[in-house]
Image (spheres, rainbow, N blue to C red):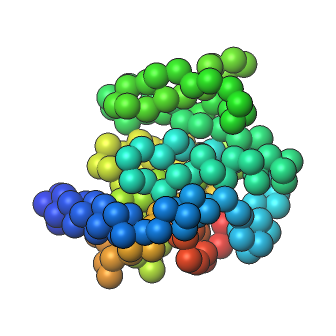
C-alpha cells in the first residue's frame, strides 16, 4: 500500500513540472497537441462505441480536442458529471457544439438529456504516470471509482510527457491504465 504523503508530494512535483513545461511550450505546439488520434490508438478504439473524455482544467492536457476526431470515427463522445463529494460520477453524451452546465469543483458537464451512458473507453486526466501504467490523479478517487464501475472499459490516461515519473505508488484499488497518450507518444500497457 502506498503512503498518502508520497502521493501528495508526487502530485505537487508533477504539477510544478507541468506548469514549467507549458510556460516554455510554443503556443502553436500547444494548440496542435491532441488534435489527432494516432493510428495505434484508433485501432484500439475500433470497437468502442462510446468514448468518455473530460474538459481539461488549467494546465491539464486538453482531452476535449479529441472530440472532433472521435466523432469523425463514428464514436459517441461523453463527458463526466460529478455526482457527489464521495467520488461518484457518471458520463453524459456530448457534442462539441452543445453548451455545458456548471458542476462542482470547477467542472462542467452536458445537459443530462437521455441520462447517463456506459463508456467503452474512458480517457482520464493525469497528474502523473509511470511506465508500469500507474496513474496519479487529483486524489479524489473519481476515476478510480469509474474504472471499477466500468471494468470492461478501455482505460486511457492523457497527459503531457513531462508528467512521467519513475515510479507512481499504487494502492490495491488503483487500476492500471491500458494506454497513455502524451503529446509525443502512445504508451501501450495492459491488453484490454
Residue at image point 54% right, 28% down: 109
Quarter of the image for the C terminus: give it.
Answer: bottom right
Instruction: State the residue in front, 149 or 185.
Output: 185
Q: Residue at x 71, y 30 (%)?
A: 97
- Residue 124 lies, in percent from the top left, at 51, 53
Q: Position of residue 26 (x, y in %)?
A: 47, 68
Residue 187, image quadrant: bottom right
Q: What's the residue at 32%, 43% (across, down)?
A: 140
Instruction: Spot the residue most to the left.
Output: 5
The total number of labels drawn is 0
Question: Where is residue 181 shown, x and y percent of the image?
Answer: 57, 68
- Residue 184 in which image quadrant: bottom right
- Is residue 122 visible in the rendered structure shown here? no
Q: Can residue 72 be seen here?
A: yes
Q: In the image, is 24 to the left or to the right of 82? A: left
Up/down of 157 relative to 53, above or below:
below
Image spot of residue 103 (x, y percent): 44, 24
Residue nearest the observer in this picture, 138 or 146: 138
Q: Work out whether 4 lies above or below 106.
A: below
Tell me the quarter of the image containing the N terminus: bottom left
Q: Is residue 22 above or below residue 84?
A: below
Tell me if 128 is positioned left or right of 118 in this view. Answer: left
* Vertical order, 145 against 4 (above or below): above
Residue at horizontal 37%, vertical 31%?
Answer: 106
Amino acid at each position: 500500500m502506498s503512503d498518502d504523503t508520497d502521493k501528495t508530494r508526487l502530485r505537487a512535483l508533477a504539477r510544478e513540472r507541468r506548469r514549467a513545461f507549458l510556460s516554455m511550450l510554443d503556443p502553436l505546439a500547444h494548440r496542435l497537441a491532441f488534435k489527432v488520434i494516432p493510428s495505434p490508438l484508433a485501432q484500439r478504439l475500433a470497437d468502442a462505441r462510446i468514448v468518455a473524455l473530460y474538459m481539461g482544467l488549467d494546465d491539464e492536457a486538453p482531452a476535449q480536442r479529441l472530440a472532433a476526431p472521435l466523432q469523425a470515427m463514428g464514436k459517441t463522445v461523453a463527458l463526466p458529471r460529478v455526482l457527489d463529494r464521495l467520488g461518484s460520477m457518471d458520463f453524459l453524451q456530448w457534442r462539441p457544439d452543445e453548451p455545458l452546465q456548471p458542476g462542482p469543483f470547477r467542472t462542467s458537464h452536458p445537459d443530462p438529456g437521455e441520462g447517463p451512458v456506459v463508456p467503452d473507453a474512458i480517457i482520464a486526466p493525469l497528474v502523473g504516470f509511470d511506465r508500469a501504467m500507474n496513474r496519479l490523479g487529483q486524489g479524489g478517487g473519481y476515476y478510480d471509482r469509474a474504472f471499477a464501475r466500468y471494468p470492461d472499459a478501455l482505460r486511457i490516461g492523457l497527459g503531457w510527457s513531462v508528467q512521467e515519473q519513475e515510479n507512481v505508488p499504487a494502492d490495491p484499488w488503483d487500476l492500471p491504465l491500458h494506454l497513455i497518450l502524451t503529446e509525443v507518444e502512445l504508451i501501450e500497457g495492459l491488453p484490454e
